[in-house]
Amino acid sequence: MPSVPAGLAERKRPPPGAHRRAPDRTRRLVTGVCTAVLGRLAGFVVPIVLVPVTLPYLGTDLYGLWMAVAALAGMAAFADLGLGSGLMTKLAPCQAAGDHELARRYVSSAYLALSLLAVTLCGALWLLADAVPWASLFNATGQVAPGQARAIALICLTAFVLNVPLSLIVRVQYAYQQVGRSNLWQAGAGLVGLLVVLGIVRAGLPPVAIIAASAAAPLLVNLVNSLWFFWRDGSRIRPRLRCVDPRAARELLSLSGLFFVVTVVTSVATSVDTLIVAHALGLSAVAAYVVPAKLLGQLGQLVVLVNVPLWPANGDALARGQLAWVRRITRRMTVVSVLATLLPTVVLAVAGERILDAWLPVPIGGDPWLLAGLGAWWVVQAALSPRFMVQNAAGVVTPQLVGWAAFAVLSLVGKWYAASWFGLRAVPWVAVAGFALAVVPAALYGYRKALRRAARPAPEWRSDGQLVG
């Protein structure tokens, strides 16, 4: 039998016609988007119910400390080093080809790497716990006892670190086209935390129990989800220590490193607006910028919710050579994403000042040009997000890195001078211009590159499982 081409090295032979069979990925994509939106709604409801219950129970000082520690954990969102993104990209072709052996090697290697990282970070955290002035770090001196501040910090940070490897299950389920099921599990984590916290309040347990339960709920739900998946649907790719493969680990780390760098560069480029406004215009201008920015930032969450399910779906389609489906869905999702962000932007640009005045007890103004610029920023991102999902699925990351790095340089300088010369309203418009100049060309080039890579002739298999030619 002829040797398998290098591009399929170390893969099992797919069953006859596997590269031609297309699952009903469109239906699963719609299900994934719908459940993501429902999960997001649940994410809104849980805090609305919890805050009036937990704030008086904990008190303002303890509640503020809890939120500060949670914010510190949120700043470490890159703790998986991009391995989750890299794993999702690598698993989609394995799923399409039915190559469970290679998928298991990727899964085993990723879980081992992040488990070792979590153990190391937990060990360092607990070893250094007594040396860190937790109360001073969170400016809680005199308001919360040092021992209590230490306990809360250790509980929240330990739960966050342990959840880093456990949260890989979300990426695995996405890669295996179980987006809807994964979203329901994640929504369940919030609801479980809500019910447990309400039970603790009703039982009159110590306030720290609320914090511990809230921190542990996502971790425990991910653990149960992992056990359920790997002992049922995903038993053939269940991670095992003997399946850890140095070669697969190197491939995974190489791709994940690029995703990690892109994430860091993107976060830096898009998160410095507040600092620029504070230094260029003074602290008095920060509130006038941050409040509408946070309000319109919900559009960004909507863009992510709508488009992330495209990532594994595109990976499956690209692996099967079904480029027509990729192009068609990309066009449709571009229209959906743009409309989903454009309509709220128009409403806020026209009536935003009245909405903000009615919502906030302190008037901060609502410059229509500022609101329109903040909305336009999310509209242009929404227009390109489906194309980024194609590149992510194909592992084409370098064009994104180049584009976002150029954007970071252009926007940082441009925003500073624009804020100084033209005022607050100019800041988001500079971001839109920088995005058009730097990110759009890179995104279009990367999209075409991803399609060209997938268009390479795929190997054909005869009905007896033999490789043709």
Image (cartoon, rainbow, N blue to C red):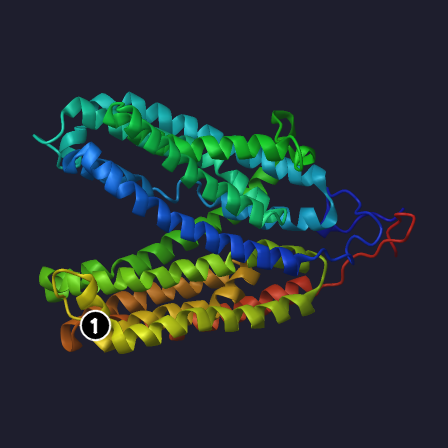
Residue 131 position within the rendered picture, expressed as x and y whole percent measured from the top left: 20, 24
Q: In the image, is residue 288 above or below residue 126? A: below
Q: Which residue is label 1 attached to?
A: 354
Q: Quadrant of residue 290?
A: bottom left
- Count of residue discs: 1
* Label 1: how many Cα within 10 Å (few below 14, some 14–19, many 20+): few
Q: Residue 322: x, y in percent? A: 71, 64
Callout 1 amino acid: Arg
In this view, the residue in front, 424 or 371, is 371
Q: Do we see residue 429 in this rendering?
A: no
Q: Identify the residue shown where x is 37% and y is 56%.
A: 265
At mark 1, the secondary structure is helix
Q: Position of residue 311 (x, y in %)?
A: 56, 56
Q: Is residue 20 visible?
A: yes
Query: In this picture, is 301 found above or below 157?
Result: below
Residue 212's quadrant in the figure?
A: top left
Tell me where residue 173 sits by quadrant: top right
Residue at 16% x, 28% y is 133
Compared across the picture, whether 153 is left or right of 452 comes to left
Indicate left or right for 15 with 92 as reference: right
Residue situated in front as seen by the camera: 274 or 2: 274
The C terminus - image quarter: bottom right
